[in-house]
Image (tube, grey):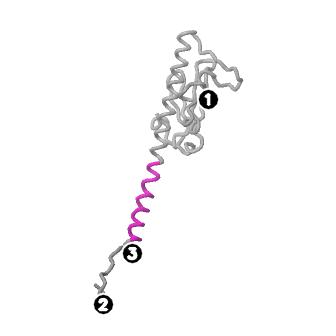
């Protein structure tokens, strides 16, 4: 009680509040980059699955026609059947990766190039060809990205 007979109000001091804010700030500074790295990794995994799905489509076409044939009605150089895949055309995936590729003279190759928020991914563009060769253009290298 104070000298006027009223109970003393207890609460946080300014120092306690500043310490709490500093702790939350430090936790956020550590957690946010880790969270963003995890998000990029999960989108990269989805892009890898799309590339493997595209490769399977090309192999099914080869098994049926004994050739890697190009279906390119719009003239953009990319295989229309591959680019029309539900995996590639999904709205969220279209905002993270740009897919390209199709058959060439000796086989096929498909490529997933990161865009927008995914562009800073350490793996860069991911590629896959008819021999199963997996590539990554970024600093992390194919072994760490596939």
> Tag 1, which secondary structure?
strand
The residue nearer to you, when weighing 107 against 81, is: 81
Q: Residue at x 50, y 26 (%)?
A: 52
Q: Is residue 67 above or below residue 7?
A: above
Instruction: State the SS at label 2.
Output: loop
Image x and y of residue 13, in percent: 37, 76
Residue 96 against residue 21 in the figure, above or below: above
> Residue 54: where, in percent of width, then height?
54, 24
Labelled pair 1, 2 in contact (Cβ < 8 Å): no
* Residue on which disc 2 sits: 3
The residue wearing badge 1 is 100
The image quadrant that residue 82 belongs to is top right
Q: Which residue is mark 3?
A: 15
Q: Residue at x 44, y 50 (%)?
A: 34
Tell me the crowding category of disc 2: few under 14, some 14 to 19, or many 20 or more residues within 10 angstroms, Cα based: few
Going from N to C along the chain, the mark reached first, 3 or 1, is 3
């Amino acid at each position: 009680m104070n000298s006027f007979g009223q109970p003393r109000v207890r609460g946080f001091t300014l120092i306690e509040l500043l310490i709490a804010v500093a702790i939350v700030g430090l936790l956020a500074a550590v957690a946010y980059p880790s969270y963003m790295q995890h998000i990029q990794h999960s989108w990269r995994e989805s892009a890898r699955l799309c590339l493997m799905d595209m490769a399977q489509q090309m192999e099914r076409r080869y098994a049926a026609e004994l050739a890697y044939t190009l279906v390119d009605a719009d003239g953009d150089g990319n295989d229309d059947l591959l680019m029309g895949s539900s995996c590639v055309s999904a709205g969220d995936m279209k905002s993270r990766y740009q897919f390209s590729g199709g058959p060439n003279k000796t086989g096929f190759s498909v490529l997933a190039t990161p865009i927008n928020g995914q562009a800073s991914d350490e793996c860069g563009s991911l590629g896959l060809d008819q021999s199963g060769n997996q590539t990554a253009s970024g600093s992390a290298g194919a072994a760490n990205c596939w």
